[in-house]
Amino acid sequence: GIQVEQSPPDLILQEGANSTLRCNFSDSVNNLQWFHQNPWGQLINLFYIPSGTKQNGRLSATTVATERYSLLYISSSQTTDSGVYFCAVTNQAGTALIFGKGTTLSVSS
Amino acid sequence: SAVISQKPSRDICQRGTSLTIQCQVDSQVTMMFWYRQQPGQSLTLIATANQGSEATYESGFVIDKFPISRPNLTFSTLTVSNMSPEDSSIYLCSGQFNYGYTFGSGTRLTVV
């Protein structure tokens, strides 16, 4: 099946810093989403982005489908950005999302 | 976007008992999915649940342990049967929509 690799596994930032999270995938994808899991375990959808670029406030994402990677940018990080960020994909044969192992982000004030 | 209400949000259960988790969607959805997230790990797909047919289970998950019901296009349940401490996890349901996938808020299960 399709493989999803996220990097870095852990990231520690000071408030106000910028960061880039990466997601590599091993096959063509029909769907790619970025999620933020907060400390209470809730999974928040950030972007549905199988290709192209999107922005939402301080967050933006870019997927280069032909090169099989996606990037999530966080600018001017805040303590509330802390948590685990997951990339998840489906390929053309699949229907369910397959998750990467996540990037754990810690933002300190 | 659709909203999926999941309950209970958390529970502490005795080993050997069963717990049923419910997910209610505020719109019709053809495909629903159940995931398990063990402590400190990523999400692992348990099964795919379509209305009117038996759920399709992933390798390592069996119907006797995780029976699933999908009586209509807005509702599904997952039962965790004969629980052991190794079943302590977050369980999440998900639905597939035109704009992507939405998740319930999760059930944090602790088995003692």
Image (cartoon, coloured by chain):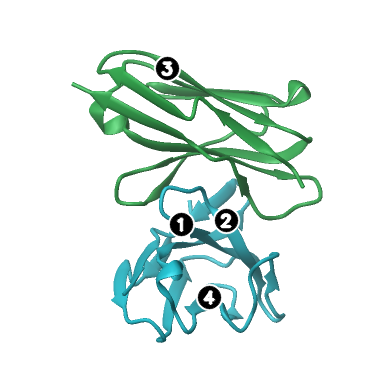
Chain colours: A green, B cyan
**Circle 2 sits in a helix, a strand or a loop, which is it?**
strand
User: Mark 3 and mark 1, same subunit?
Assistant: no
Task: Kindly identify which residue carries mark 3.
Answer: A19
Which residue lies under the disc numbered 2?
B44
Circles 4 and 1 on the same subunit: yes
Instruction: Measure how far apart labels 3 and 1 are at the Cα level.
Output: 27 Å
* Residue that label 4 marks: B76
Confirm whether circles 4 and 2 share one chain. Answer: yes
Inspect the image, locate mark 1, and give the three-letter code of the amino acid beneath it. Answer: Gln
Instruction: Please report whichever mark, 4 or 2, sits nearer to the chain's N-terminal start.
Output: 2
Q: Are marks 4 and 3 on the same chain?
A: no
Please name the amino acid that badge 4 sits on: Ser
Q: Position of residue A83 (x, y in %)?
A: 35, 37
Disc 2, disc 3: CB below 8 Å?
A: no
Quadrant in the picture for residue A44 = top left
Q: Is residue A47 above or below residue B76?
A: above
